[in-house]
Amino acid sequence: MAGGEQAEGLDWRDGIVPVSRRFDDPYFSLAGGLAETRHVFLTGNGLPERLRPGFHIAELGFGTGLNLLATHLLAPDMALHYTSFEAFPISAAAMAQSHAAFPEAAAVSAPLVAAWAQGQRRFTLGAITVEVIEADARTALPLWSGRADAWYLDGFSPAKNPELWGEALMAEVARHTAKGGTFATYTAAGHVRRALQAAGFHVTRAKGFGTKRHMSTGVLS
């Protein structure tokens, strides 16, 4: 994007961690974003044990694409589907800069960054078929025809980005979840847990990443 991070509303902590000015929140944990993704979203959804060809992962908040890269690293040869909803996409340059903090992720991120730079929002990463829907999930998710086997709920903090954690949207998440499907998220905020429970998930409070005491996981009952 012309103008770099200033134009897209990003600050950088130590030149490594992108922080959204819009939400005053970092895109990933200061204690280690890749490790956080693995703990929260992969382990939280019972992956890789549940993965099979055709398994569909959906996500609220594509951000830097780090969760996608972690999924690819987990199962590089598995034919998966990955759908993400992102209202405020960052530039390919900022994406690449953020990946540089994690050599393991940066080593496999070139196809993602190249596709992003070319404006592609449907592309493949290894064996994963990816679609990023650039829209407000509150309007886009109700129109989506898919159903996910696992959800990564990765919006900015509920206190700073409440739009991505409301009851109506959590109900749509449940409506677009396959039978026995799961979600995982870094937040354990009470109103988010209650919204997911009301939507039909059996919600469990689990150990959080790093110094964070708790996170939330759930299975559609």
Image: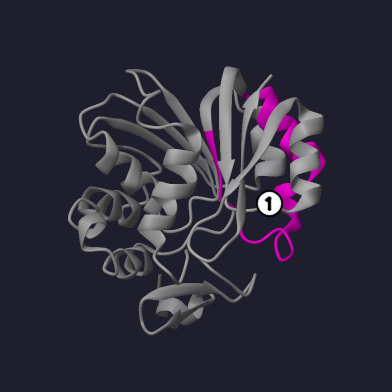
Q: How crowded is mark 1: few (under 14 residues within 10 Å), some or many (20 or more)?
A: many
- Choose between 207 and 178: the one closer to the eye: 207
Let me know if residue 173 appears in the view.
yes
Image coordinates for residue 115, horizontal then vertical, percent: 29, 49
Residue 31: % across, % down:
43, 69
The answer to whether residue 8 is seen in the rendering is no
Q: In which quarter of the image is the C terminus?
A: top right
Percent across and percent down for residue 175 are 69, 23
Side of 121 relative to 143 (left or right): left
- Residue 47: quarter of image: top left
Q: Which residue is drawn at 79% across and 39% down?
A: 195
**Residue 144, placed above or below residue 13:** above
Task: Check disc 1 and report its element: helix, strand or loop.
Answer: loop
Q: Quadrant of residue 96?
A: bottom left
Q: The disc labelled 1 sits on which kind of residue?
A: Ala
Q: Is residue 65 above or below residue 167?
A: below
Q: Please say which color scheme the image uses.
A: one colour
Residue for badge 1:
188
Whether residue 157 is in magenta: the answer is: yes
The spot of residue 22 in percent (x, y) is: 64, 72
Q: In this view, does 117 lie to the left or right of 139?
A: left
From the viewer's perspective, is 64 left or right of 21?
left
Q: Nearer the viewer, residue 38 or 22?
A: 38
**What range of the chain is rendered magenta?**
151-176
The residue that appears at 28% across and 39% down in the rendered structure is: 74
Furthest toward the left, the residue is: 107
